[in-house]
Amino acid sequence: MMDRPHHFQKEREHGGALANAAAIYGRDVGDWVDLSTGINPISYPIPVLSTEAWTRLPEANAHQAFQAVAADYLGVTDPHLITAAPGTQCLIQMLPGLRPVSNVAVISPTYNEHAHVWASFGHRVVEVSGLEQLDDSIDVVVVVNPNNPDGQTYQPDILLDLADTLSARGGWLVVDEAFADVTPEFSVASAAGRAGLVVLRSFGKFFGLAGLRLGFLLGPAAFIAMARERIGPWPVNGPALAIAAQAYGDAAWIAAHRQALAQQAAKLRQVLARHGRIIGGTDLFVLLQADNSAALHAGLAAARIHVRDFAEQGAWLRFGLPGEETAWKRFEAALALI
């Protein structure tokens, strides 16, 4: 197996962090267009909430009802196979502590918290470029599907076969589906409960409400019961329960925005193709490889447009969707000057 051992790093780069960009290049954060994340720029409209949603602790039955709505949206047949948490990141932090020290393979390059957190718990972590590089020594495989930042996808049947293989030797397949709302055909969420299969889902990216901090863990019933015990009571706040329940039930908004995001992503690929090679992406972001990536990044920053660069892949830039027409015009005008 060709692999790259993971080296523990204290600081990891992420999208967002507009305040840092503003501190370097100037102007208030509100003057910037943030294209550094894969978050839907046209967010779900926040409904009017009851006073009780803010002032009372969430009732257990309200949380259970919400999980049933979320399970239905994700195609999960039994709400006992899913649990909610205040963001997917806290679930990523929790998972390595739920099993003994193991050999872990992370399909990379990908969201860098996965390898970091597993290594921080003392697991032996290697980063590999594809499933074909795995061998029988691996206990846990982490796959982001579709992948961030290049959008690579694996068919569900391939992943489920791998989950069966790993489960037969006591292992796990962890599938992070943070961006799967725009590619539901690649999701394995409906197979929740299958031995060895652990699935992570995010609410905020597709619905454009990342500040809500809401994520889900899917797996076998006994595993989910253990996770719920570890997470503790009141894992999701009242406003998040109310907003997400309405959003997940809004089939018309979901369908319309899947179509709108696909159109925006196609336009973004067309615009960026003049500035380098499109490596991949999803309907929420596009990954570009450009010989002048540093100049592109700096030129856009000078125009108060923030995009995601990558220290280890120096020629890569990831672009989120501009969203509103004014943001598109600023973006295209800035590109024309570089």
Image: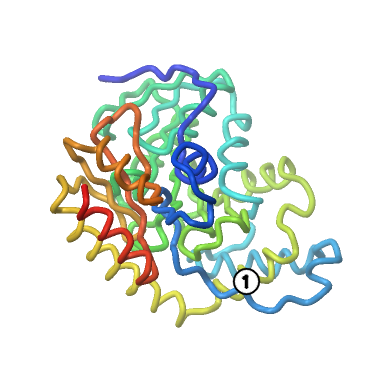
Q: Looking at the image, is 8 positioned above or below residue 204?
A: above
In the rendered image, residue 171, in percent from the top left (x then y), is placed at 47, 32
Q: Residue at x 43, y 45 (%)?
A: 175
The quarter of the image holding the N terminus is top left
Q: Report the coloring of the rendering.
A: rainbow
Q: Position of residue 126 (x, y in %)?
A: 38, 22
Q: Secondary structure at mark 1?
A: helix
Q: Which residue lies most toward the right here?
A: 56
Residue 160 visible (yes or no): no
State the image quarter where residue 70 is shown.
bottom right
Q: Nearer the viewer, residue 99 or 209?
A: 209
Q: On screen, 2 above or below 187?
A: above
Instruction: Name the residue: 73% across, 52% down.
Output: 235
Examine the image and state in which quarter residue 298 appears. Answer: top left
Kind of residue at disc 1: Ala
Count of numbered badges drawn on the protein: 1
> Seen in the image, is 234 located left or right of residue 32?
right
Direction from residue 149 to residue 247 in the image, left or right: right
Mark 1 surroundings: few (<14), some (14-19) or many (≥20) residues within 10 A: some
